[in-house]
Image (cartoon, grey):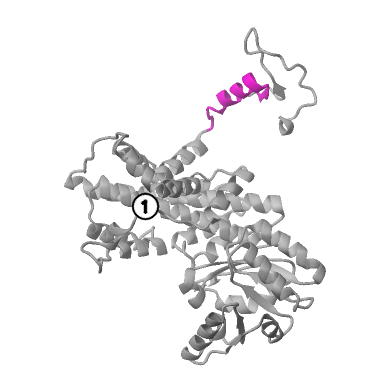
Amino acid sequence: LNMAEHGFKVAVYNRSLDKVDHTVERAKAEGGLPLEGFKTAEDFVKAIKTPRKIILLVMAGKPVDDTIAMLSQHLQPGDLLIDGGNEWFPNTLRRAKELEPKGILFMGMGISGGEEGARNGPSLMPGGPPGAYEMVEPIITKCAAQVDDGACTFNIGGVGSGNYVKMIHNGIEYGDMQLIAEAYDILHNAGGLTNTELASVFTQWNDGELKSFLIEITAKIFDKKDDIADGWVVDKILDKTGMKGTGRWTIQEAAERNCPASVMAAALDARYVSARKEERVAASSVLQGPSPTVLPQEEKQKLIDQVRQALYAAKIVSYAQGMNLIREAGKQLGWDINLGECARIWKGGCIIRAVFLDRIKLAYQRNEQLANLLVDPDFATELNARQLAWRKVVALALEHGIPCPAFSGALAYYDSYRREKLPANLTQAQRDFFGGHTYERTDRPGLFHCRWSEHHFDIGDLSGRTKGNL
């Protein structure tokens, strides 16, 4: 419907014919949009002008393979298939390779924005073989969300890169949501803020540095009265969070690329813990914590401001970790991904859209080789100004027995990254003691092994050993 509204003739097909009929009727109701539905895959494919551009919107995994098999028998060399779902990027690489002998191009394109974004303008993250982006550029640049500096799309890179960037987008989204949840927990259970007060606080925050889609909807959530029972809807929602898998993929990738991802990992773990509701209920009557207390009324405003500062600082860390993971994957997989452009296309249409992304874009424009957002001069200044408030929030949460894994994980990363010397020397000494893994010294080059005790096994000559095979 989005494409049809922009003047492109659209053909649609679904194995569920009711969905085809519904889409056709909706196109008619919305002003007679140029959209035609088809009952068979063959008729659908034949109706499209060559070279064909076909977007698949099906569940990840086997359904995508089945759909490709169904359509490909009717396609011709030069046609382009685009997977618009949340797919594990190795599957996209495999499918592109399988279709290559047939001359069929295959592209993965991350789409963010939910149902509303898809209809009115999403953030689009395409990555495919040479020439694929140029085939769809006139279409997707019109259909994507539009912001002050252009359409929320660009050519991410090679095959799989679009899925990868969307995966990291979703990982960052997990982190953002967890940080907001922890801010709520602290303000409500340590600060004693009511839902009405929380709605007001988040509304105010959405007028400043935290302005974003997630902060905006959070204010609306706290303001929503229940129309089934007394009170607010948020208080009636069971504290079990679902997920679809992209968060897990992000953490798997972080481990594969040796990249820290503490905020996203904390968010994923928090969802796993939330799912164990019955266990938590049982544990609540066995395990002890500090006695519940609420700050005095006069301390509320100070806490609100401290949490605001902590939330902003932790967000910087979360995005820094996500961007570094994109960069590292790009290096290892041969994708030349523009990180500033990634931040730019997330400014509109998508779930993590935020005014804050403009600053990330500018940071990478100032220095394309920026090692970490934390050391960008502007972000470093902001972190330095907020780190004391951040520490006070984490300390208060710990004192009150309120879990804040994302806040504390972000702070631990910040403190680790700013330290010239970490206690990893002891860890490496232990590895050498029990496994003969050797170590490097600070005062001379080379690899060394120590005979740590009288009965310690000596692994002998280290010649020929390198860090890469230890």
In the depicted structure, whether residue 9 falls above or below residue 411: below
Q: Is residue 130 magenta?
A: no
Please state the horizontal and vertical placement of residue 460, each as a whole percent of the image.
Answer: 76, 16
Query: Can see residue 226?
Result: yes
**Count of labels in the image:** 1
Q: Quadrant of residue 428?
A: top right
SS category of the residue bearing label 1? helix
> Residue at coordinates 56% horizontally, 23% vertically from top-left?
426
Q: Specify the amino acid type for callout 1.
A: Ala
Q: Quadrant of residue 98?
A: bottom right
Query: Which residue position is annotated with label 1?
Result: 181
Please state the horizontal and vertical placement of residue 356, each as a whole percent of the image.
Answer: 45, 59
Task: Give the side of residue 452 with respect to residue 378, left or right.
Answer: right
Q: Is residue 436 magenta?
A: yes
Task: Give the side of residue 112 with respect to residue 90, left or right.
Answer: left
Question: Which residue in the rendered view is the most extreme toward the left?
Answer: 297
Q: Quadrant of residue 50?
A: bottom right
Please state the horizontal and vertical placement of residue 389, each as a whole percent of the image.
Answer: 34, 43
Please state the horizontal and vertical placement of residue 217, each as a whole percent of the image.
Answer: 36, 64
Magenta extent: 420-440
